[in-house]
Image (tube, helix red, strand yellow):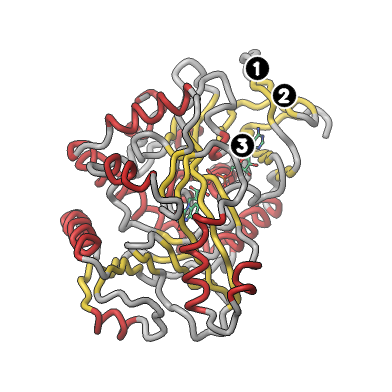
Amino acid sequence: MSDSRTDVLVVGGGAVGLSAAWYLVNAGCSVTVVSRDRIGDGASAGNAGMIVPSHVVPLSAPGVISQGLRWLANPESPFHVKPRLDVDLARWIWAFRSHCTAAHVAHAAPILRDLSMASVDLFGEMQEQIGEFGWSRTGLMMLHRSEKARDANLRNAVIAERLGLGVRRLDGREVLALEPGLRSDADGGVLYEDDGRIDPEAFLARLSEDLVRRGAHVREGVTVLSIGNRQGSATPVLTDRGEIRASTVVLAAGAWGGRIGPRRLPVQPAKGYSITVDSDGTGPRIPTILSEEKVTITPLPGRIRFGGTLSLAGLDASVDTRRVAPIRAQVARYRPDLTAGDVDRIAVWAGFRPVSPDGLPIVGRLRLRPDIVAATGHGMMGITLAPVTGRLVADIVTGSAGVIDPAPLSPQRF
Ligand SMILES: Cc1cc2nc3c(=O)[nH]c(=O)nc-3n(C[C@H](O)[C@H](O)[C@H](O)COP(=O)(O)OP(=O)(O)OC[C@H]3O[C@@H](n4cnc5c(N)ncnc54)[C@H](O)[C@@H]3O)c2cc1C
């Protein structure tokens, strides 16, 4: 690749970077996207694909730290922090801890609701324009069988309901009526009617095809090494394939996003796993979260995807078989035709969620470098929030007044 010039350089070819590029092209910008490896090599391909306005309570919430400490001793627990000397991690945990308050939940929940409901509308518009990617407003069930999980689910249901989301409490009979193919012994749950799912791989494919069709440059296998000081109206960005000069640089590098650029952003990689198997069509119809196991089950076109775990272990992509065990156990339930050996041999996908300390994404211009727009930190909701983030980034770059105020997402809050 020779040196080149573009209005906007988007660093990162995940759901967030591609959505930002798509809305920037809609706004008339010339756009180049660079991604270190293939499109979808980050967290945006093998994730659960759930679109979750239901997730109004941020990860940083009261009780999370004490629950996390209890889980630390269990090698199969869904949450894990690898003990290590890492100043960034220590700072991140400190900031995370300070946000685990009821006041923070009250602040963050309406913001997450507005962002995710805006995305729900945008998914419909995008699918009409770029082609089918499996978007469907299926609803989502949070199931439980223990009293503790039921109480927690019902508490969340009240918060969601107060924020105007469609919520139905279900007993065991109603769960089975909605999902006759259920293979769980849950005896109740909550149905979130505004939720849905997409096929993440199809979403990335449709977006990048449409971008290329409309003249954007999507370059795979290009790694950004550094972002230089502004020179006149252009920012020089050094990559391993030459220099690119851009009027604006959008940092959408997911879990790697905190380390590129002149300012370190407080983003920690939180590893999760998924296993995908073929479906004969008799499997689940509604995306489901098993509250005790913290395992997700998503019906995708022709496939079922099982996911889970959240491990703060740095950018270590190795698969910890003990933590995958609860996910494999669900695969075995839904595919009883497979032997235990078959289930153990199915490939496990690992991805890094880019997690911010307050559970809100980081979107906005850097204070001392207004030529750089951050778009990262989406944590467990990066697929859900990709379209609205794309819109916000395009509004910020073009100076348009958007439907949502991006101020609470500004990088300056840290
Ligand atoms: C198991 C699991 C299940 C999940 N389920 C859901 C779900 O159901 N719903 C939901 O909303 N979210 C879910 N998530 C979260 C979601 O996947 C992420 O939040 C989202 O994919 C982040 O997207 P992104 O574009 O920011 O990052 P990524 O998809 O990780 O993309 C970042 C890109 O930046 C590139 N990059 C990095 N460094 C450089 C560099 N120096 N130069 C060039 N390119 C670079 C990478 O190669 C990568 O392509 C899940 C995550 C996991 C792990």
Query: Which residue is pictured at 83% across the width and 30% down the height?
Result: 2
Q: Give the residue type at disc 3.
A: Val
Q: Residues within 10 Å of mark 2 (few under 14, many from 20)?
A: some
Query: Which residue is pictured at 45% across the width and 68% down the height?
Result: 297
Q: Is residue 143 left or right of residue 295?
A: left
Q: Give the residue type at disc 2.
A: Leu
Q: Are marks 3 and 1 in contact (CB under 8 Å)?
A: no
Q: Nearer the viewer, residue 313 or 287?
A: 313
Q: Are marks 1 and 2 in contact (CB under 8 Å)?
A: yes
Q: Are marks 3 and 2 in contact (CB under 8 Å)?
A: no
- Residue with the mark numbered 2: 238
SS at circle 1: loop
Residue 275, image x, y percentages: 57, 64
- Residue with the mark numbered 1: 228
Mark closest to the chain's N terminus, 1 or 2: 1
Quadrant including the N terminus: top right
Distance between the alpha carbons at the discs numbered 3 and 1 = 15 Å
Q: Residues within 10 Å of mark 1 (few under 14, many from 20)?
A: some
Residue 11, image x, y percentages: 62, 36
Q: Where is 388 relative to 397, above or below?
A: below
Residue 296, image x, y percentages: 43, 64
Mark closest to the chain's N terminus, 3 or 2: 3
Q: Nearer the viewer, residue 267 or 311?
A: 311
Q: Is residue 400 left or right of residue 22?
A: left
